Amino acid sequence: MNIFFPIELFADWLTYNIFGLAEHTRFSEVVNFFIYDTIKIGLLLLVVNYVMAITRYYFPMEKARDILTKKRWNGLNYLLAALLGIVTPFCSCSSIPLFIGFLGAGIPIGITFAFLISSPLINESSLYLFPAIFGMKVTILYNLFGLAIAVMGGMLIQKLKVEKYVIPELLKFKSRSQIELDNGGSKLSFPQLISYFWKDGMKITKQIFPYIILGVGAGAIIHGFVPRSLVENYLSAESLWTVPLAVVLGVPLYANSVSVLPVMEAMTGKGAPIGTVLAFMTAVVALSLPEALILKKVMRWQLLAIFFGITIFGIILMGYLFNLILN
C-alpha cells in the first residue's frame, strides 16, 4: 500500500485539472513530479521534526548517547540503524528529515549516516520486486551488499570524527530541565507543551524547506527531460568502465526505485551486466543532486563530499563484485 497515494491524487488533480496540462508530456511530468515530491517531503519533514521535538523533551538523550557509543556493541548499533532504514518508505531526499531528527537528538553521527545510506538503498523494489525480475540470488546478494555498505559507511564516518562539519545551529536544542527553568522552574502545561513542540519542530522545518524546493525542482527537471535512451545505450557494453560510468550517470538523477525499474529492465534486455545495472539503480536512489542540495543546508561541503565519496566507492565495488560473481 502506498501511504502517499492521496498526495499523488492531489498532484494529478492540480496538474491535469486545475492547471489543465496535457498528460504524458515532459512539462506536465516535471510539474506533477515537483508538486508530489514537494508536498510529500515537506509533510514528512514537518511530522518527523515534530515527533523529534517530543522525543528530545521526554527521552534522556544523554543516556541514549552513552548506550549507543559503548564499544561493547561491536557495530550492532550501526546494523540496527541500517535495519531501521530498510523499513522506512523513503527515497534519498525524504530520508533527510529523520536523519536531521537523529542528529538533533544527539545520536552519534556514524549511526545516523548508516540510516541515511540504507533507507533509500534497500527499498521496496529490492525486497519485493527483485525476486520476480532478477531472481532470489541477486535479491539476497543485493540486500546484503546494501546493508554492508550502510554499516561500513557509517562506521567509517564515525571514525573520521566529522561532527565539526555539521551545521552547529542544527544541534542547538534545550534539555527538558532547561525548558522548565525558562518557565520559572515549573512544568509546562499541556497547551504550553503543544506550542513548544510545534515551535521547536518548525524551527528546522523553516531552515530546510527552501532547500527542499530547490532540490526537488532540480530533480523534477532531470526526471522530465533526461531521455531514458541516453542511459540505456551507454551502459549496455561489457567493459570495466561501465560500472563507474553507471554511477556517474546515476548520481545526478532523482527517482525512486520503482520508477527506475523500467530502465533497469531495458538495460538488462540490451545485454548490460547485472552489476552495472544495479550500480546505476543504487546511485539513482541512494544519491542524487537534489539530496546534495538539501544536505548542504545541514552539513558543510567537506562532510557532504565524504558521504558521497564513501557511498559511491561502495556502489562501484558492489557493481564489480556482482559482475565478477554472476557473469
Image: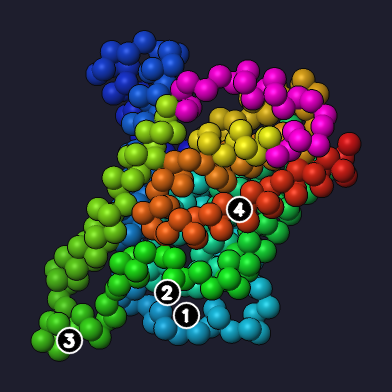
Instruction: Look at 73% across and 54% down and name the residue there.
Output: 144
Q: Which mark is residue 309?
A: 4
Q: Give yes or no for residue 237 being in the magenta stretch.
A: yes
Q: Which amino acid type is shown beneath numbered disc 4?
A: Gly
Between discs 4 and 2, the one toward the N terminus: 2
Q: Nearer the viewer, mark 4 or mark 2?
A: 4
Residue 180's spot in the image, x, y percent? Answer: 19, 83
4 and 2 marks in contact (CB < 8 Å): no
Residue 270's spot in the image, x, y percent? Answer: 77, 20
Label 2 packing within 10 angstroms: few (<14), some (14-19), many (20+): some
Q: Which amino acid type is shown beneath numbered disc 1?
A: Ala
Q: Nearer the viewer, residue 194 or 101?
A: 101
Whether residue 281 is visible: no
Count how many numbered circles sit on residues in the image. Answer: 4
Label 3 packing within 10 angstroms: few (<14), some (14-19), many (20+): few
**On the image, numbered disc 2 is attached to which residue?**
106
Residue 58's spot in the image, x, y percent? Answer: 33, 77
Q: Nearer the viewer, residue 135 or 289?
A: 289
Between discs 4 and 3, the one toward the N terminus: 3
The stretch in magenta equals 222-244
